[in-house]
Image (cartoon, rainbow, N blue to C red):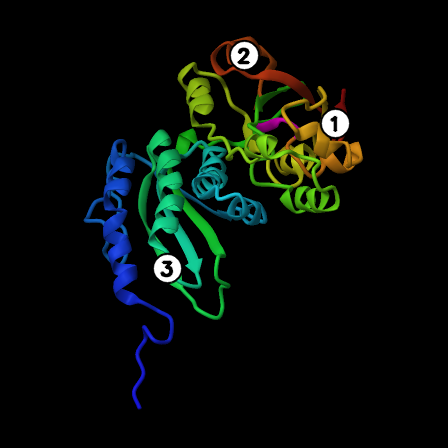
Amino acid sequence: MSFTYKEAGVDIKEAASLVGDIGELRQRTEWKHSLMQSFGLFAASFDLSKWKQPVIVTGCDGVGTKLEVLLEHDQLEIAGKDLVGMNVNDILTTGGDPVMFLDYVGVGKIDKAKITRVIAGMVDHLESCGCILAGGETAEMPGVVPDGVIELSGFCIGVAEKPDLVDPTRIEVGDVLLGFASDGFHANGWSLVRRILAAKPGLVSDEEMLPLLAPTKLYHEEVGGLRAAGVDIRAMAHITGGGLPENLERLLGDNGADIAIPEWTAGAIPKILSHVETPEAVNTFNMGYGWVAIVPEANKELALRVAGAEVIGTVTAEKGVRVTVG
């Protein structure tokens, strides 16, 4: 008796045809940068010769348990956008330009329509910031990944001129923290959100749920505006898991910050926050700010004019990040 890979649950031809199906989608991501060689080889190549002192910056992230809610509500495109946002934003904090993105998609059985929708979401975000979808891996793993489940991971590569890298060691006491609005919870804190929703059926209506699932916002335009205006950016933080305190403490070293923010009142978010103590919420969610830039006081007014931010705090000599809400 002989066996085949397809009978074991893996359809190689279906996987190969998926690559062809997404070709036109992927081409949309090459308007700013292009691969050096053809797409679809065993590895992607990128020409760094236009940079004088190129420094490579890299990042890797996923969508977390928000993915379960997105699958439940058939929001596959948002999953793709979240995957890109979580990675590209991390690259932007360095001062680097995101140039290549790769994805890993793990499934029990290939469903081309569903996977194409996820990739379409990736392409929407990648196209908007000029980052190439350079390749990836779709793994069909019957018996390992349950039917109906999708595993997602993303990897981003950026490039910066060495003198243009953001250097957080330049932060000084008195520098200003500028907060940039988030579009919701983004892709962090969803294990807590899911627990609340499970414990409180009907807390959030179907109509309220979709805005609650808004994808992770890209901050490339805000960063580009600051840089084009000549703002002296001391540091930038992508506010993800751990909220404002943990993400800013990475940058501040022996300094600290005093932060004051208003109550987060967008959409159904207050319904979720009503079941969480304020300190827990501050240390779990972005609290309405997905991005923070730290600039000198002398650059504050210029930064506010060009980037649509608001002042949320000041760097202090006292170590630790103290957040006041309301």
Q: Mark 3 or mark 1: which comes first in sequence?
A: 3
Query: Residue lying farthest bottom?
Result: 1
Magenta stretch? Answer: 287-291
Mark 1 crowdedness (10 Å alpha carbons): few <14, some 14-19, many ≥20: some
Mark 2 residue type: Leu
- In what quadrant of the picture does the C terminus appear? top right
First along the sequence among labels 3 and 2: 3
Q: Which residue is mark 1?
A: 323
Dot in front, 3 or 1: 3
Give the secondary structure at mark 2: helix
Quadrant assignment, res 48: top left
Near-viewer residue (225 or 146): 146
Which secondary structure class fits the magenta region best?
Answer: strand
Looking at the image, is 246 positioned above or below residue 175? below
Judge whether 93 appears above or below 305 on screen. Answer: below
- Residue that carries the numbered disc 2 in the rendered image: 304
Look at the numbered disc 3 and give the secondary structure of its residue: loop
Badge 3: residue crowd in 10 Å (few <14, some 14–19, many ≥20): many
Q: Residue type at mark 3: give it.
A: Ile
Tell me whether circle 2 and circle 1 mark residues in contact (CB < 8 Å). no
| Coordinates of residue 160 in the picture (x, y in percent) | 38, 35
Residue 160 seen in the figure: no
Q: Badge 3 is on which residue?
A: 110
